[in-house]
Amino acid sequence: MQQFILKENVLTDNILLISDEGKVFKGNYIAIIREYTYSTAWSDKLSVKKFRSKDKLVNYINKNYPEFEFMYEVN
């Protein structure tokens, strides 16, 4: 599994998890994004986005994280 930081927040970072070549995550997902939004000064709220296709993943990253350069080959 490969991990990439999409955005650095004060408490937690938004992380992209990509499965290794020839493997998938449970549920047949190729990538998972863990996004944290501000909740209180001491904690953030976690939301998880899961992707089964490369096209949906690339579109989501380009729309929500335009500064992130996505150069990794997804299965």
Image (cartoon, grey):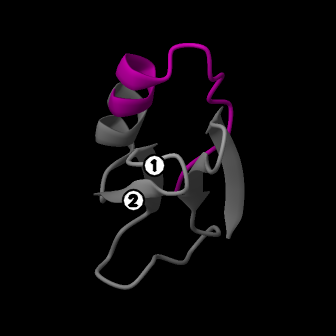
Q: How many neighbours does mark 2 have within 10 angstroms: few (below 14), some (14-19), or many (20 or more)?
A: few
Span shown in magenta: 60-75
Q: Nearer the viewer, residue 15 or 62?
A: 15
Numbered tag placed on residue 47 in the rendering: none
Kind of residue indicated by mark 1? Tyr
- Could you tell me residue 28's position as x and y percent? 32, 76
Q: Which residue is mark 1?
A: 36
Secondary structure of residue under mark 1: strand
Name the image quarter holding the N terminus. Answer: bottom right
Relative placement, left or right, of 53 versus 70 is: left
Decide whether the magenta segment is chiefly helix, strand or loop: loop
Q: Nearer the viewer, residue 9 or 1?
A: 9
Relative placement, left or right, of 63 versus 9 is: left
| Magenta highlight on residue 68 | yes
Residue situated furthest front in the rendering = 41
- Could you tell me residue 46's position as x and y percent? 39, 59
Which numbered disc, 1 or 2, marks the residue that appears first in the sequence? 1
- Could you tell me residue 23's position as x and y percent? 54, 78
Q: Which residue is mark 2?
A: 46
Secondary structure of residue under mark 2: strand
Residue at screen point 44% across, 78% down: 25
Residue at screen point 63% across, 37% down: 9
Asked if marks 1 and 2 touch (Cβ < 8 Å), the reply is yes
Kind of residue indicated by mark 2? Leu
- Could you tell me residue 56's position as x and y percent? 29, 39
Q: How many neighbours does mark 1 have within 10 angstroms: few (below 14), some (14-19), or many (20 or more)?
A: many
In the image, is residue 30 above or below residue 54?
below
